[in-house]
């Protein structure tokens, strides 16, 4: 497999291949804005630097912190019952 070039533009299929994710997952990531993309002719185009940003450790750390805060909030809500 080739390496992701930061200034290259990729299709959703190529992005799926790099990230090893399903069609439904790429759609969900695009819809939620986790992967930022531009629509050209009705199809998404994704910059390589955006793919690299998604797999960076900082994004993973942020996701873990967000999940932990949500988990704590749910736990506190349940305790109030």
Image (spheres, rainbow, N blue to C red):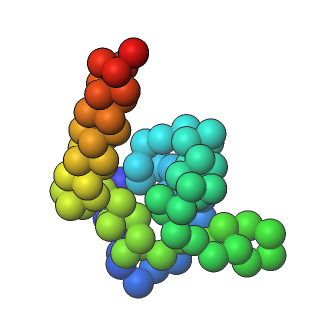
Q: Residue 25 lies in what quarter of the image?
A: top right
Q: Nearer the viewer, residue 59 or 47?
A: 59
Name which residue lies at 48% across and 41% down: 21
* Nearer to me, 59 or 18: 59
In the displayed structure, does residue 67 sit left or right of residue 43? left
The answer, for residue 24, to whether it is visible in the render is yes
Front residue of this view, candidates 44 and 75: 75
In the rendered view, tell whether residue 12 sits above or below residue 49: above
The quarter of the rendered structure image containing the N terminus is bottom left
Asked whether the viewer can see residue 60, the reply is: no
Q: Which residue occupies 23% across, 47% down? A: 65
Q: Quadrant of residue 23?
A: top right
Q: Position of residue 47 (x, y in %)?
A: 48, 75
User: Which residue lies at the image location 30% right of the left edge and 24% below the top edge?
Assistant: 75
65 sits to left or right of 54: left
> Residue farthest to the bottom?
7
Residue furthest toward the front? Answer: 80
Please indicate whether residue 69 sits to the left or right of residue 24 in the image.
Answer: left
Q: Along the horizontal axis of the image, is 25 left or right of 20?
A: right
Residue 12 position, x and y percent, is: 59, 58
Q: Is residue 32 above or below residue 9?
A: above
Image spot of residue 55 (x, y percent): 30, 56
Q: Residue at x 62, y 56 (%)?
A: 31
The quadrant the C terminus occupies is top left
Q: How many numbered marks, from 0 up?
A: 0
Q: Residue at the far right: name it.
A: 41
Picture coordinates of residue 15, whole percent (x, y):
50, 57
Q: Nearer the viewer, residue 8 or 26?
A: 26
């Amino acid at each position: 497999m080739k390496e992701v070039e930061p200034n290259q533009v990729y299709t959703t299929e190529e992005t799926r291949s790099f990230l090893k994710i399903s069609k439904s997952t790429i759609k969900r990531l695009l819809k939620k804005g986790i992967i930022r993309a531009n629509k050209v002719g009705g199809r998404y185009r994704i910059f390589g630097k955006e793919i690299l940003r998604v797999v960076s450790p900082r994004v993973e750390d942020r996701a873990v912190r967000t999940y932990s805060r949500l988990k704590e909030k749910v736990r506190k809500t349940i305790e109030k019952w």
